[in-house]
Amino acid sequence: MFRQLRSKLRKSHFKGNVYPTWGNGSSRNYSELKRETPDFKYCVDLLRKNDKKKYMAGLLLPKNLQKPYFTLYAFNVETAIIRDSVRGNEQAGRLRLQWWRSAIDAIYAADNGRIPKHPVIQLLQESIQEHNLTRRWLDRVIDARESDIINTEPPSSMAAVEKYAEHTMGSILYLCLESIGIRDDTADHVASHVGKTIGISTLLFAVPHLSASGYVSLPVSEMAQNGLTADQVLSYASARAARNQNFPQEKLDRLGEIEEALTGTVFTVACAAHDHLHHARELMPSLPKPAVQVFLPVTAAAQYLDELEKNQFHVFNPHLTQPNSL
């Protein structure tokens, strides 16, 4: 069954050098970015610590895109890490997200007295005012993060996974396009597919980490198609964590069956990511030229999917769980 995905990988527009240069010499390295304002340095460092691949991609972008890029992805990180930081405390998580909602309310209402002196908020205000960013995309990110805190069960289907990816990564990409003055239907279609590619790949990468916390991120429908349950994923993750123990043969056999169902599920989900990558690749020639740079972060997702295929879709393989794998 792996031949299907291998063929897609070979045809991917985003294969090759994971971080190509744009050849215009206009990007800035970390040393140069550190000399920017403290607010901007905060955003750069936040990405450097929490999302190394997108940080690396940002270093290669033209100067005119770097500031909104790091600002928007810092906003993405700030809202994404709330779930882990509140550790199941739904009320605390919703209160923290409401703080972000209120700050964005104040920005769009031009109520400077209510705008917090927070680095990301301050730069968001600049980007919103300078580029007339669409508020709906920011609201969708927060709404998606709130649903993440409220819903502790696995997503019901691939459609639910794709919706979440569209509302998070897709929204950030739409805002990046707007920040360089691109409001184009084709570019939006590519952003939707690229957002889903990155979102689904991130979900797969997060499976071991989330399983250790008692949460299964794989969609229920795809698990069911492969004879897998969420409890079995958690059981497998627990066994992997205790892999130095001497399990009886019966348990080893059972774990082997779970592993087979798990790799089948991961393969199905990975194929969905590659379908979106393929559609994005087909539309690339029709893009306004400046739009291409916005989609640079997808190269890391494509690389991860390639490595996942090389490792026979064993998502718990230690080689794939390193922080720099995605």
Image (cartoon, helix red, strand yellow):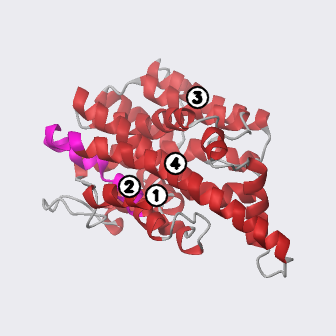
Label 4 or label 1, whichever comes before in sequence order? 1
Which residue does the numbered mark 2 point to in the structure image?
4
Which residue does the numbered mark 1 point to in the structure image?
1
Label 3 or label 2, whichever comes before in sequence order? 2
Instruction: Name the residue type under label 1.
Output: Met
| Front residue of this view, candidates 204 and 99 | 204
The nearer-to-camera label among 3 and 2 is: 2
**Residue 224 covered by magenta stretch:** no
| Front residue of this view, candidates 57 and 286 | 286
Q: Secondary structure at mark 1?
A: loop
Which residue does the numbered mark 3 point to in the structure image?
143
Q: Secondary structure at mark 4?
A: helix
Left or right of 143? Residue 303 is left
Seen in the picture, residue 131 relative to 302 is either above or below; the reply is: above
* Residue 249 percent coordinates (x, y): 83, 76
Q: Secondary structure at mark 3?
A: helix
Rounded to the nearest angstrom, the CA distance separating label 4 from label 1 is 13 Å
x 42%, y 32%: residue: 125
Which residue does the numbered mark 4 point to in the structure image?
269
Label 4 or label 3, whichever comes before in sequence order? 3
Label 3: few (<14), some or many (≥20) within 10 Å? Answer: some
Q: Which residues are magenta?
A: 282-303
| Front residue of this view, candidates 34 and 132 | 132
* Residue 194 percent coordinates (x, y): 36, 43
Rounded to the nearest angstrom, the CA distance separating label 2 from label 1 is 6 Å
x 30%, y 66%: residue: 29
x 43%, y 24%: residue: 135
Cβ atoms under marks 4 and 1 closer than 8 Å = no
